[in-house]
Image (spheres, helix red, strand yellow):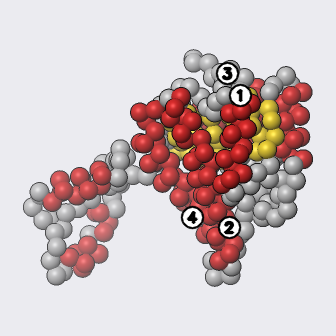
Amino acid sequence: MKKIDFSGRVAIVTGAGGGVGRLHALGLAERGARVVVNDLGGAVDGTGGSASAAQKVVDEIRARGGQAIANHASVTDLAAVQAMVQEAMDTWGRVDVLVNNAGILRDKTFAKMDLADFRLVLEVHLMGAVHTTKAVWPIMQAQNYGRIVMTTSSTGLYGNFGQSNYGAAKLALVGFMQTLALEGARHDIRVNCLAPTAATRMTQGLMPQETLDALQPEAVVPAMLVMACEHAPTRAILCAGGGTYEAAHITLTQGLHLGLTPDTPERLLARLAEVTDPAGQMIPASGSEQGANELRQAQLTPA
């Protein structure tokens, strides 16, 4: 087996003051990484802030013989994020790993949700990841090496009642990852998504206690380490919870060519089961493959 070793690497983990983020930071440090522990120190809903959360994790890492520095910038503040990355460069001269873990919750049904809460969740999860990634991208290009992990969610992949804002942000990160992985390939920048299921303060009250007891957040960390290491895949969506690891895929069915006639809507409705049939479905290597499949189908006799 290939050893996962981060000796000589520098990692930034956002939202690392508690929960899964803290464990990500500790896991990277335990395997040799020097870690920037970023956390605003706010509540689950994003209110408030304190530098103490990040510093406590830094103290843990240092007590175990590792190297770490604390940063409490909000990922929504591009200038503060850029300053954080510059601090990492000034301290250690490189940035190899970025784990975009910071997030908040503002749960309500869509009918009752204030659009300000919708926007803020998008700002933290999506634009926060955009800000951090934008700040490290030229560094990773210049050194021809980078590993970026986005934190998506089963809510984004499959939906969850009362979390339309969270789900929209989390699936957007998958789309962000898909294109970044293509653009980063020639510089060996590998970009992946992690969908964790874990008992943290963000999941308290959402599941029965016995379920939470089985979903220890430590079990999510191995998937992150795989996606952040030298031997990482790219464009993977790994799901992790309770010691089980799965992969999620956005697939394309073979489809059915119907042509374009006045009754195409009716024929499509009548044969929708054939269009959605998963038999022979594929995982496109890029968005252009959808169009390529449609052009191939168009050469067939209309069904």
Residue 131 drawn above or below residue 1: below
Quadrant where the C terminus lies?
bottom left
Question: Mark 1 Cα within 10 Å, few/some/many (few <14, many 20+)?
Answer: some
For marks 2 and 4 on the same chain, the one whose residue lies earlier in the sequence: 2
Q: Quadrant of residue 183?
A: top left
Q: Which one is closest to the eye, mark 2 or mark 4?
A: 2
**Local SS, label 2:** helix
Give the Cα distance between marks 3 and 2. Answer: 36 Å
Q: Nearer the viewer, residue 34 or 243?
A: 34
List the residue tagged with mark 2: 120
Image marks 2 and 4: residues in contact by CB distance under 8 Å: no
The structure residue drawn at horizontal position 50% and vertical position 35%, both measured from the top left corner, is: 141
**Local SS, label 1:** helix
List the residue tagged with mark 3: 8
List the residue tagged with mark 4: 168
The amino acid pointed to by label 3 is Gly
Image marks 2 and 1: residues in contact by CB distance under 8 Å: no
For marks 4 and 1 on the same chain, the one whose residue lies earlier in the sequence: 1
Question: Mark 3 Cα within 10 Å, few/some/many (few <14, many 20+)?
Answer: few
List the residue tagged with mark 1: 92
